[in-house]
Image (cartoon, rainbow, N blue to C red):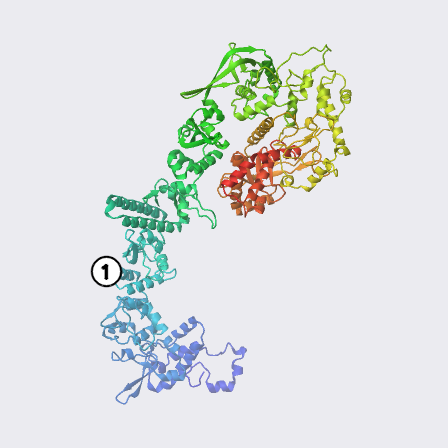
Amino acid sequence: MNKKLPLPETVFPQSLAGSIGLRTLEDKHFSDWFQPLPFDIWTGFISEHPGMKNGHEKDDAMRILVLTTLSKHFDSLESTTAKRRFVELLPLASPCLPFDTTTGEDNLSTFKTAPPNELYLPDTDLSAFSGLQTFHKASKRLKKEGVSDAFLLAMGVRKTIKIEFLFLHLDTLNWNSNPKPLIKYLIDADLSQQDLLKLRSTRYLPAANDQTAVYAPSQLYLKDKDLDIFPFVKFLQWPSNESMSVAARNFLLKLGVRTEPPLSDIMGYLEKESAKSIDARDDAALTTALQYLTQRLAPKGTYANQFRHAKVDFLPCIRQNLETSEVIKEVKSPSTCYFNPTAMVMGFSVLDPMLTDTEQIGIRMNIHRDPSCQVLLRRLLQLVDIAKAKLDHLERQGTKIGTEAKEKDIEKILVLFEGVFLYLSSRTSDFQKRHLSELEKKPFIPCKCRGGRLQFYTADQVFFVKRQPEGAAGGDSIAELLFQQVEYSAFLSFAGVKTEPSLEELFALMMKKPDEVLDSLGEPKYKMLLRRIAADPPFKRITADIRSAPFLLGYLIVDEDESEGDESKARSKAQYILAKADDIHIVDNAFLRRQFPMLISPMEQTLEEFYRRIGSKYVSEVVKKNFEVMGSTRRGTPLANSCADRIKERRPLLLSPSITSRPLVSNASTILDNLEIFQADSIRAIYSFERSSKMINVTCCSKLTARKSIAIFITNNFELFDLGSCIGDLILQHCELKDAFFLTSLLEASIGTLRNRGFPVDRIVKPQPPAKEAKAEPRKETTDITNRETSSNNSRGSRSTGTVKDGSADAAITNPTQPSGGFDTILKNMYPQCDISKIREMLGPNPSKEKAAAVANELAEELNKNVTGSEHENKNGTETDTESMLRAKKEKKSVLGKMREGLNPVRGIGGKMPQILNKRISGSPQGAGGGAGFDGRGKSGESHREGRGVGAGQGDDAESKGREDAVQKSLEAMLQQSIQSSRSVNSSGVASQETLLQNLPEGIDCGSNGCEVVPAQNIRPFKGPYGNFKSRYGIRVMAAASSTLEANEAFGFLSNNFDAVDKFSVVIGHLVQIFNLGLGTVAIYYDPNGNTIAFNSNKAFHFNLRFFHAIHRHDWKSKGCYSYWYTVFCHELAHNLVSAHNKEHGKYTESIVMLYLPALIDFMTQNGIA
């Protein structure tokens, strides 16, 4: 502390303290006596000192020294509390502070003091208030001596004038030119909340370019170029050459000066400006104002979440006049316009494209991008009504407007709706099915009809135009000919328009408008459509409407004879018309058809079966037959007896269900057992159809006798075919010509021939019990019904005149008195190279049927052992037939041999057939089914004949070619019956275990264990993109599921390659039609493992997509593809008869291939498959 400062009386004088010494004074032993002077006690002392209270000039130096000491101590204090307590000790109310003042013209300084609260800091700028009052500032000497401003402010020295003084003189101040000093003063002023409130509401600030008034801070804006567009904005006057400090800006904002106008003011300006006419409106200013507003409507913008003006019309929009295509400018509210410009095509108002970034404007002003789905559909129907009204107006105008103008108006409507559907397609993802319920029954799709008229259709009445790939052959599709077509549209597809009509839709149209469909398609395509319907009928049951609808093609055939020189040539002309099923007849007898003019069905099996199902009848059913037996009738004549014997003998074959292709009547067996045969002089048939009748002489008929039994009448020169036809009418539910021909062949062919063809003739070889020897008596001569001349008085020469000629069985039957029961003769005929005595020795006396069968097997095994001997060399003599066949089997590996199928056991025909064990193996058969065998003419005689089907082989050399053809036709019928016995695919899949087929015939390569392994199959349904577990064309789709990994792989492959499934289903579907099967009998599956190409499960067929995808996915319309899968299909069909891969299976496969090959060729030719 300065020694010049005044001290209290209790303080040691400086001289005494110096003599005692500071060390002694500070000794702790003397602390109870004296201690250092505390600064607070000195401060209290000095505050009451006269020099600090009186303010005399003489104490000026001392006051300056005291103030300096007090300021330093104040500045050394750290806490605000300590500073506040220290200030309370100071002489605040005393004139202790000196201030400078000037008087006179020479500005002479005079000395004065004043209390702290009456003075201002030395550096305070009070020029803004000059002239109002004299303001005193603390002496500058204080700052020079080290007194801080903070200490002075703590004592009460003011930095600014009192706010009361400012408010008192506020109206007298003039700030129009520069309010900067005032703002600067107010920044430094100690303003209370009440002061700030008064400053915000008082008008005292000038506006730029406005000298007429002053404004409150809230009425003015800080200068901003972006606000120049708003005429209602007034900026605060500020020196243009001086920038505003951050402190000044913040203080002005605190007072209420604005930087952004209120949203209500901007909306008022926009509404007022938009309401002006187009000529008076300032579009540039309006656009700039909208941009300004849009920017501040951003998520963190000034007006975020404040916009509540959805119904205020202020937005410049455009709208298209749908009738004139003129663009109209208008003003709309955010709730009545949209910002997607493509919505204009439907007549909606959209934001004017002149506005920059219309999308941002739309989003931030809550404008919908597009109309809602409901609004769109209502507008679509409104457009339809408007278009229909326009069309009605054009119709009423007639020729007044001209054809060209009318065409232009129609074209405008089509173009309009093309744009509408294009826009709606972009909105397809927003629609749901429930939204489109309004359109289901309403025509809304315009199409130009063939006559040039424009008409609207429902979604189920039109289809998309099917684009042909480049280079593909042209041609009108059924959909194009029958239905209206439109270009593809995603919206129309969602609304129900399809790429092509379903079979149900085509059938419904045929039912409703058959004549129009026929006129549009023409007869060939109409028939093709009937084939599709017949192959997969689009109805569950046949209703009365279907039966009575005239949608079936009926043909009226006119038979004519044309003369060409000396020869006449039959020619038929056919006329087609549409008729109902009951009026059309199925030709099962061409002879009866030629007798009467009648409508007949197309002569195709598929269509005939379809017509029959709907209600058409066979010609033989509608043509009534009545027979008149002329002249006398005789019973027991040689001819009648021979005929009766033959019928009795062949009875088991005639009644065999596995041979006949038609179902038998329930009492067929009784009919044949009680049948009577009469010989008549002549027989006349009376055929009647509707009101016409014809009489023709025939050679055989059946009638009821007086005893109500059935009798067959034959003439002397009767035809065996008439007998077969007559028996067919009696025992079959329906007998067609092929059935009659088949029955005729059973009656006419010899037992040997039938055996060689594979017929179960053992049914009629019945050994007789031994009888006592009797003297041979001449047998009564009978007539041979199989060898007759047309004359009635003689018959062909024969060594057994008066017997029915037959094969090997006849000797045993006609000579039952032999010791061996006749079996020796039978076995001799079967094995002519064996000695008869050896056969009798092996049979023994009175052999049973089982014994005869055992001997037959022994002989067959013995012959098979010797078949490779030198006596059976081939013609070249280099290798045996057996060696040749084995070598061929090893070299030939066809697709049929490579297939491994999982089969449920299928009961086949034949099993163990002793009758074929005697056949020798031929190295080079001369036809399908051809072979060589012993013909009974010598020990080693051979007969090579060209086969014409399964079972073609050796027979009587005297048999005619027609008889062999009859047998072949009967076997073809058997194959067809087996194929038609195919069953539907199990909808739940297939789960079969691995199977071993034991005891396979010699020559089948089955590995070392002698068994054929049939792989296990485990497949389950695959739902697919159509949701019905089927392909597009209705074939079931499945996937292998032996394990989870395999199932995932199969399901993934099908999901990614379902287009291959649809292609494969087309191929398989066409093959199904060729075999006259239903689509339900086949399935497509995918198995990523194994070598199974296809398999037959319970007579249902499954085809592996993996092989189709690998081989034919790129050329699935080629002959190679169809030939490959046709062969595979035939292979699987043969398994309906035989399970194992043996000779029988190969024989049946080849026969099926040949049987249906013409149909395959016709199909590929008609469909241009190359």
Q: Is residue 503 left or right of residue 335?
A: right
Q: Give the residue at x 72% y 23%.
A: 828
Q: Is residue 552 left or right of residue 380?
A: right
Q: Residues within 10 Å of mark 1 (few under 14, many from 20)?
A: few
Horizontally, residue 524 falls left or right of residue 1117, namely left
Instruction: Tell me which amino acid carries mark 1.
Output: Ser
Rendered location of residue 1129, percent (x, y): 58, 37
Q: Considering only vertical position in the picture, is 291 above or below 956?
A: below
* Residue 908 visible at all: yes
Helix, strand or loop at label 1? It is loop
Instruction: Farthest residue to the left: give it.
Output: 212
Toward the viewer: 385 or 414? 414
* Residue 516, horizontal then vertical, whole percent: 37, 37
Q: In the image shown, does 871 or 1015 lie closer to the viewer?
A: 871
Examine the rendering and report whether any part of residue 1036 can be seen. Answer: no
Which quadrant of the structure image shows residue 271? bottom left
Q: How many marks?
A: 1
Instruction: Pinpoint residue 965: horizontal percent, then vertical percent.
Output: 59, 28
Residue found at x 59% / y 19%: 789
